[in-house]
Image (cartoon, rainbow, N blue to C red):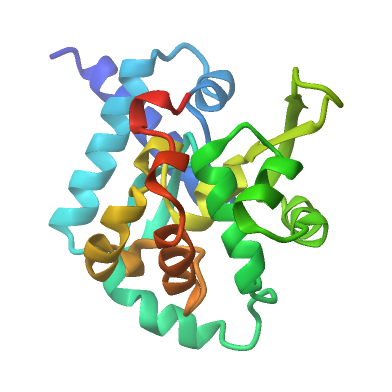
Amino acid sequence: MDKKKLIDYKFITQIVEALLFASDVPLSMNKLLSVIDNVKTSDIERAIDELNAEYESSERTFRVRKLGGGYQLVTEARYAKYIKNLFKGRAKPQLSQAAFEALAIIAFKQPISRPEIDQIRGVNSDGVVKTLLERNLITITGRSEHVGHALLYGTTPEFLRYFGINNITDLPKPRELEELLGSTQEEFRFAKEGEEEAVIEQLSDLPQDEILDEDEIE
């Protein structure tokens, strides 16, 4: 192999690592391509594979993971307990049970209007929808074509980051959450204690015919 190409590729890998280290949000492939000159998608994917292989072989405490449509350096799940202890008392206020109920409905039914959320919950959802908007967990995605043209809501990239997933289709179905929670809850990098249980409880109460199948989620 040409020595110059080998040196250049090693430098690309170092650049990718530096960018991921410096960023506090996931970096999309398009963002990485726009920042690094004269590279292809395959170059960056290879660099990320090389970094993870190096981290694993040297038993580092972190990996590059795909979250919220981008790449980010995250610590391994087995260290979650100690990281939580480090930041104890500094976490943002937790969402209420009502907010998680509304968030679960939006996640699985999006795009959905507030009247539809109210109908499923059986109570007015003005307050919790406002809270979710303020926390950037949901956003306005358009207007309904029905009478009144109500605003429609959907989840945001911050929602994906909050639960440590890359795509909305990665979110477990309600009937799978209880089974999967034991092995995945420590991987929810931004989740707070007790919130996963709240999601399970609220999602489990939703009628199964009210929830989208995976192939219905865009």
Q: Quadrant of residue 216?
A: top left
Which residue is located at x 38 percent, y 36 percent? Answer: 169
Relative height, residue 139 to residue 131 (above, below):
above
Q: Nearer the viewer, residue 16 or 45?
A: 45
Q: Is residue 61 visible?
A: no
Q: Name above or below for residue 101 compared with residue 192.
A: above
Residue 120: horizontal and vertical position, in percent? 60, 50
**Quadrant location of the N terminus in the rendered image:** top left
Task: In this rendered view, identify the residue nearer to me: 188 or 195.
Answer: 195
Q: Is residue 92 left or right of residue 202?
A: right
Could you tell whether 37 is left or right of 125 in the image?
A: left
How far from the left and from the top, in percent, is residue 174? 36, 53
Residue at figure coordinates x 33%, y 20% from the top left: 43
Residue 96 place in picture, x, y as percent = 65, 73
Q: Position of residue 104 (x, y in %)?
A: 53, 53
Q: List the single residue furthest toward the right.
A: 148
Going 38% across and 46% down the picture, which residue do you hit? Answer: 208
Work out whether 53 lies above or below 130. Answer: above
Q: Nearer the viewer, residue 103 or 6?
A: 103
* Residue at 82% in and 22% down: 147
Residue 181 location, quadrant: bottom left
Q: Is residue 210 visible?
A: yes
The image shows residue 17, relative to residue 5, as above or below, that is below
Q: Nearer the viewer, residue 174 or 133?
A: 174
